[in-house]
């Protein structure tokens, strides 16, 4: 069994059958939408993920110039988050992003991305851009925690214990 077959089976729930992907699998809803093979989708996912991470890391080189930093960091962030659309499909990713559990985190994240770009590209205000980037990072962190069971509760409890001023 080659590595691609093992990866495919791990993503779709692995059976011994070699038939088409089931409808509710991660890769299942993308079969009819595009002509990319599974291998091409995995390559596209990896390319977007690496490009996004590279942009985010390289953005720290121009940290002294907050507007350039914000643009590079935000586009890298969007590439990284959007890279999973190649694996699970854009429709399923949007459904998961706007799931009631993640709705507020997604809305705040998208709002902060838009605000960071507006502050950086049109208003040219460095302070507002940095505030929007910090909010963007926090919203993405909170959004990411929604995929880990009980992670939000643990982080919330930890923050209450750390920030509690009453002894």
Image (cartoon, rainbow, N blue to C red):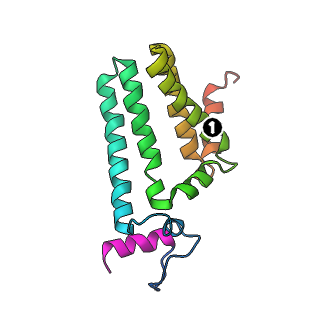
Q: Nearer the viewer, residue 117 or 140?
A: 117
Question: Which of the 4 image quarters holds residue 64?
Answer: top left
Q: Residue at 50% of width from left, 60% of height from top?
A: 88
Range of magenta residues: 1-12
Q: Residue at 45% of width from left, 15% of height from top?
A: 124
Q: Residue at 53% of width from left, 30% of height from top?
A: 114
Q: Residue at 47% of width from left, 13% of height from top?
A: 125
**Can you give x and y, in whole percent of width and height, for residue 86 in the image?**
44, 57
Residue at the spot of label 1 = 107
**Can you give x and y, in whole percent of width and height, for residue 30 in the image?**
50, 65
**Can you give x and y, in whole percent of width and height, for residue 41 in the image?**
39, 61
Most common secondary structure along the magenta stretch:
helix
Is residue 102 found left or right of 61 in the rendered image? right
Is residue 95 found left or right of 118 in the rendered image? right
For label 1, the SS is: helix
Q: Is residue 8 magenta?
A: yes
Q: Is residue 108 above or below residue 24?
A: above
């Amino acid at each position: 069994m080659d590595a691609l077959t093992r990866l495919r089976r791990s993503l779709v729930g692995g059976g011994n059958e070699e038939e088409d992907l089931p409808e509710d699998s991660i890769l299942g809803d993308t079969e009819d939408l595009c002509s990319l093979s599974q291998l091409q989708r995995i390559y596209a996912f990896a390319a977007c993920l690496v490009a996004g991470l590279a942009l985010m890391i390289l953005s720290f080189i121009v940290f002294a110039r907050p507007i350039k930093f914000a643009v590079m960091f935000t586009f890298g962030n969007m590439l990284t988050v959007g890279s999973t659309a190649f694996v699970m499909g854009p429709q399923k990713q949007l459904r998961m992003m706007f799931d009631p559990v993640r709705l507020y985190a997604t809305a705040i994240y998208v709002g902060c991305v838009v605000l960071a770009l507006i502050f950086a590209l049109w208003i040219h205000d460095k302070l507002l851009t940095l505030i929007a980037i910090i909010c963007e990072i926090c919203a993405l962190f909170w959004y990411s925690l929604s995929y880990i069971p009980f992670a939000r509760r643990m982080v919330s409890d930890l923050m209450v214990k750390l920030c509690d001023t009453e002894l």
